[in-house]
Amino acid sequence: MKKYAITLFLLILIGVGLTAFLFTQDEKLDQTVFLQTTESIRNLQTLDKNLLVLLDQSRFNSDFDHDALLETSYQLSEEFSNLRYDALFEEIESSPALSEAVINFDENYASREEELEIYAEANGELSSALAETRRLTREIQSTDLGTTADAVNGLLGKINTQLFALALGSSEIEGDALISQLNDLQVEVPTATLELFGNYKEAVMAIASNNSDAVQSYELLSGLQTGQLLDAIEKEYVNYHNQAIKGSNQFRNALIIYGLLLLLALGIFAQQIRRNFLFLEQEVADRTEEIKTAYEELQESQEQLIQSEKMASLGQMVAGVAHEINTPLGYVSSNVDTLKLNLDDLSSLFVDLDSLNTSVLAKDRDNKLITQNLVKTLQTYKDSEAKDLMEESGQLLGDGAYGLQEISKLVTSLKDFARLDRQTTEAVNLNDGIESSLTIASNHIKENNVEVVRDFAELPDVRCIPSKLNQLFLNIITNASQAMGPDGGQLVVKSENLADHVRITFVDEGVGMDEETKQKMFDPFFTSKEIGSGTGLGMSIAYKIVEAHKGSINVESELGVGTAIAITLPVS
Amino acid sequence: MSDKNRKYSVLFVDDEPRVTSALKAIFRREYDVSIANSGAEALEKMNQTEFDVIVSDQRMPGMLGNELLAEVTKRHPQTMRILLTGFMDKKAIVDSINEGEVYRFINKPWRNEEMREVVAEAALASEIPVISHSAQSNLEESSDVLNRTSEVEPSTLADQALLMMEQAQDTRNQIRKFCNDHSIMIYGTQNIEQAVAAATSRENIGVAVIELSENTQAALQTINLLKRARPEVITIALTEEFDAHTAVDLINQGQVFKYLAKPLDLVGFKSTLENAFLRHRFLKKHKAAQRRFKVEKTRGTVVSGLQEAFSKLLGGGNKQTSS
């Protein structure tokens, strides 16, 4: 059962773990997150396109604000950072393809940002130089050029044409050639225009020097495929997302299968538990029945035991008394036989005496016959050892009388002990009860060489069930005698009058009891005797008897010293 | 040692002096009576004088009757031992058979007539020489230390014949195996009829092991008749449970050698058998000695067929039958 519980617990734990795992997986796959991320990528793409548009606009536009270009780039950078370090951080960690795409973009982007700054500067300079040339051209043309007017206009026109071509997309101007022509012309222009002309020349020189940088940067910038890289990121992201959905679906399916399996297992367990339950129920019913039967049997056997304890103590008592009676009975009946023999021996003397008497009383006295009879009688008297015979007969009769007295004493004690002829509850002198119990137990007492010392006080009559108390006294006397056997000892029986109570104390010099035995001595079935020699109920019955009389029993004992049992009983 | 004019000497032992004086009064005319009021006093008197018969009470303070008789068996094997039992004490009685080797039990209160008969028989039997106790109880000495008259015989069990009456399979097998191990010829029987048939037809049987539990009365009568017909056959009784009355009858009517409870202790059984065969060989040789183990006639009706079966055995010698 415990194994089942552990297995079940483990299965449930795994289930809960799996569910929690799937839940976090699901959270990762939140559709809004996906949409937001996709939108963020779209934003990046828009920004990227904007940047390209702005880049295109920036060319040759002297009014163009290059900060807008940089601002867009900054926004792009920020948005990308968001994407990289926030929205896509975990995905980048777990998808190498996505990571590569992002890094690619990042590298491209970093180089573009650098290039953008270079471009912005170069293009700015270029634009302002172009504006300057236009303004100076108009100013120069408005001044009086004198003789050089044609040459100057021609050159300016040529430069303007080239600059225009530049604006239209021609990447190069013939900078050095134009500068040397301008230098040549500068010597000829009137001094009033000289300063303007000098400025103009500087502006053209600035255009010439910046143009190539700006063009180079521009071409580099417009050549960067950041859009495609962003597309790659999106593609990888969508790819990753689909993978994740697929994985999550797999988890979900696994969880469903697991759930089904768990349900199945639970079903099996439930079945098992049900079976166990039914089995246990049956078992409990069976055991209950068994216990009931056992209890009944126990009750019955307890009654039997109490009965057999009664019979055993009765048997012991009867055997003891029988033995006590046997001995006097033996010699009394033997003595009767012997006395008959003795009388037979004497009878021949009487026959002789009779014939002597007859011969003496005869009318015609025959002295010779009288003498003869006298001699014969005297001889018979001598032969019969009549004196010894009379002495022996006297002794045998005395023994016989003593034996009969013993027997009658025993019979009286038996009557007093059992009290079958009296009413159950009676006020009696307990000293008499103790005395009759001692007589009943005399066989035990003699057998164990016990010397009984009586220390009786004058007692008031106690209302009790005398036969029960006698049984109690007999039990204690028997136990005490057995505790002292076979070496014997003194059993002091003391009775005391304590006004409204009577105390009877039995002090023996037996083997005594240890604390454990003392604790258990009143327990039913506890016996310190050999198995089979006692039911172990004697003292427990004794305890009940005292209890029934509302008395108390007190035991003191020491191993090897002896035991003292005091019984206190209320007088009324 | 037989002297026609000599009175037999009897020692009565009882803790109650009135009993001993009563007994003395009965026997003083025919016997040389001594009395003792304790086991110790009895042993002391026996050290001074040899007695022909000792009659002891069982229940005495100090030394019990069976203990006294066991001691007497050791010290004075010639003295016939009678135990006066007032009260059936199983263990004491069984012990007195197995250790005290009593001649008879007498129940208290006794009848003077019965007592006279038993004492008279015992007194007569005391004339007969006895196998020393040491020969019976001490294996080591049994082969060389024997009493005044018997000759030294080897205490081997080999080639002896044993009659067994036992129904319980396990005990039968146990005894069979034992006999096989010691080369004892065994006649295994399971009931009285078979046992009687074997006992009547096999002259060589020396010891009979008889189980009592199945039909105690019939088994007792078998033992009694067997003892009367073939006094030299030694009987060992087996029982499930000791019983005091049966024990008394086993001695008084069967003069069983040992009264053993099952399950058998094989070590003890071996020495018991050795002593039993030793006694058998002795009795076979000294017919007169058989009287030391004389039995009473059985009381009550004899199990039908038993008497008939034994009549052949009893033959012309003893025609008495009891009915």
Image: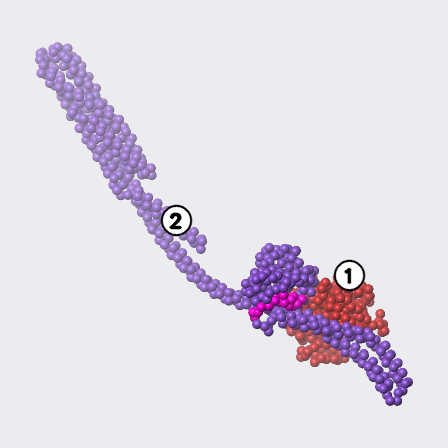
Disc 2 and disc 1 on one polypeptide chain: no
Q: Is residue A80 above or below residue A165?
A: below
Q: What chain is the red one?
A: B
CA distance separating discs 2 and 1: 85 Å
Residue shown at 87% from the left, 81% from the top: A374
Q: In the rendered image, which residue does mark 2 sit on?
A: A13
Tell me the SS state at disc 1.
helix
Quadrant of the image for the C terminus of chain B? Answer: bottom right
> Tag 1: Cα neighbours inside 10 Å, few (<14), some, or many (≥20)?
few
- Left or right of B68: which side holds A316? left
Residue shown at 69% from the left, 61% from the top: A488
Q: Please name the amino acid that badge 2 sits on.
A: Leu
Tell me the SS state at disc 2.
helix
Instruction: Return the x and y of residue B44 as percentages of the image width and height.
Output: 79, 63
- Quadrant location of residue A183? top left
Q: Please name the amino acid that badge 1 sits on.
A: Glu
> Tag 2: Cα neighbours inside 10 Å, few (<14), some, or many (≥20)?
few
Instruction: Return the x and y of residue B221 as percentages of the image width and height.
Output: 69, 75
Chain A, chosen colour in render:
purple
Q: How many marks?
A: 2
